[in-house]
Image (cartoon, coloured by chain):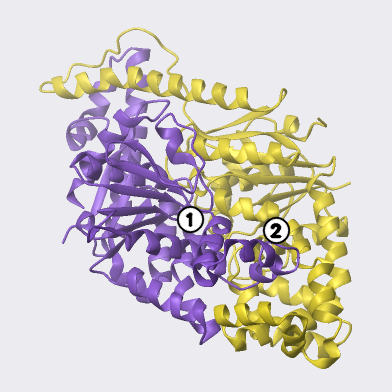
Amino acid sequence: MLVRDGRVVLITGKGGVGKTTIAAALALGVARNGRRVLLCETAGSTAVPRLFGRLSKGYEPVELAPGLWTMSITSAAAIEDYVVQQIKFRKLYHMVFRNRVMGPFLDAVPGLHDLIQLGAVWDMERKRERGRPVWDLIVVDAPATGHGLTMLHAPRAMMDLTVAGAFHDNAELIAGLFEDPGRTSILLASLPEELPVNETLQLHAGLGPLRPMVRGVILNEVHPGPVPDPPFYRSHRRALAEGANDAGLEALALADAGLARTAAQDQARVRLSALGVPLVDLPFLYRRDLGPELLLQLAAPLEVL
Amino acid sequence: MTEVLICCGSGGVGKTTSSAALAVRLAQQGRRVVVLTIDPARRLADALGLAGESNVAIPVPLADGSLHAMMLDPKRTFDEVVTRFAPNAEAAARILGNHVYQQASSRLAGAHEYMAMEKLHEIVETGRWDVVVLDTPPTRHALDFLRAPERMANLMDEGVMRWLVLPASRGGWRMIERGSEILAGILQRLVGERTITDIAEFFIAFQSLWDGFRERSVQVRGLLRAPTTRFLLVTTAAPTARAEALEFLELLLADQLPFGGFLVNRCASAPQSSGVPRFGAVPGAEGTVAALQELPERQRRLVAAQESAIAALVAQAPRGASVWRLPEVGAALHDLADLTDFARALPDPAELLQPR
């Protein structure tokens, strides 16, 4: 089964490796094939609308491109939504939970902020219209490694903490979706460099029982090789350098640096292949700004997922 | 006064390496420097070749300067803080053994960040160093880290305390029930009775620490805005990293935190020579030569994109923000020798320390 044929895709990984870009490219690619996709940002992040030249900051889904919708989940909005569902009265919620006494009390429930954000995704997943799911696929741009792990483990953590009560039962329902490999996949975003790869391997280990949910690693910003035939280049480098002009010598130095990078990229691939999941390369783009056209370029290699 | 340089930014940009290189460079200039990482992934250990020990400043065997490094164990710091502020050993033990405390101190998002600020404060107080370089967790997490002192202070707001703790003698949960049947009913339905008891006990046990904690979080907030503190944004010119850097910059400015400048990592430099690259004649090398001839142009495009990206960043920053460029290093820096060589070639970071 392809990742895109499931219900939910969670993308996490080291900070700054391009999780948001990858999530947006994947979502845009799936939407292009005529499906309704919801791309959720977490922890109040609003980078996605910016990629489409928009400035929406809302909890309510907005459409960015045909079939591609986005929402920014904040724990405050998600908690309100959730508690109102539980106690039925919004007014009561504002009286009770947003006052100075109860607000901090609710904040003190460990892991609640993380759980409740997954809860918002869970809620979107089960929305139906005339018996059909409202969203064909939900892509979640989850927080970076440490926080991402906390979030993914939040349902279990809450169940361990509460043992009984509505939070416990809801955490169990939420865990049911996010621990079901038939409906949910996890993609790990990384860069083809030593430290990001270390972190990806640690992240994978940290997923513990959730490891079977990992369905791919995305290597972002992969640079093209500098020369078509590296062994040929290496064996003739000396001859090429003899009689080279200054520009030629500089070009050779650039090729050497490029080959060192290629070697590091290859090594990253070898180490990540130990995880036994598909590796997808996304090219480094020599561009200043990302927009929908560049995202579509990145969407193409993701179609294997 | 100890100068505090807080390096923020997303993880994939080489933040740990940049922080370490900055610390080494400052030490090479004769300052006594300590570099502190609060990243749970412990990447500074990789860069500096430090092994497991946490929460203590370990001397880094630098040939030409005084440098210490410290890795933070947030859970342990939290325990230390509790022990320090608790009136007696029994009170400390009660908190350390509380179920909610155990969850909160190791798992609660923001707890790590708060404890980093705590440690930072402690280090500044010793007066042992001229400069502290703090390597923070990746961006989005770091938002929590900036808010951590505030959040902690909110948690300790007297509203909660008055309500929960005043009738503490009658036992936590029962008293909530008396306080408000409705609230209690709702809460119980949400989290179950045991959790409420745990939370109430946690608050009650924490009561003895409150004053110490609250005072401390006010001090930490003050430290973040002190004239000797500067936030540095570590980034690269890559679009993904910049987007996060800008998000972070907005937050810093909104919170009126002192911004010092950008550390732009992995800067490429443009080829010096112009003209078509020529090479020695090699039979069958047409394809290779064609590819080689493309490389300077490819590099120029890269540098042009990079410089316009940096200019766009600077345009968003307050006037006078400095830019400290770090060159691209082929592979990661593996040991201290690599790091010191790398640092020695870096530009003088004095501008980052200039008073604003």
Same subunit, labels 2 and 1: the answer reads: no
* Chain A drawing hue: purple
Query: Outermost residue toward the top?
Result: B275
Query: Is residue B245 visible from the viewing direction of this image?
Result: yes
Q: Chain of mark 2?
A: B
The residue at 45%/53% (across/down) is A14
Q: Nearer the viewer, residue B249 or A47?
A: A47
Q: Position of residue A45 (x, y in %)?
A: 51, 46
Q: How far is disc 2 from disc 1 in space, using C-alphas? A: 17 Å
Give the amino acid type for the residue marked by disc 2 in the picture.
Ala
From the viewer's perspective, tell me whether residue B19 is left or right of residue A72.
Answer: right
Q: Which residue is mark 2?
A: B148
Say whether marks 2 and 1 touch (CB < 8 Å).
no
Q: Nearer the viewer, residue B171 or A161?
A: B171
Q: How many marks?
A: 2
Q: Quadrant where the N terminus of chain A lies? A: bottom left
The residue at 61%/78% (across/down) is B186
Q: Is B148 rendered above or below residue A168? A: above
Q: Which residue is mark 1?
A: A143
The residue at 80%/52% (across/down) is B221
Query: Is residue A18 visible from the viewing direction of this image?
Result: no
Res B117 → quadrant: bottom right
Q: Position of residue B356 (x, y in %)?
A: 81, 30
* Chain B drawing hue: yellow
Query: Outermost residue toward the left?
Result: B284
Give the amino acid type for the residue marked by disc 1 in the picture.
Pro
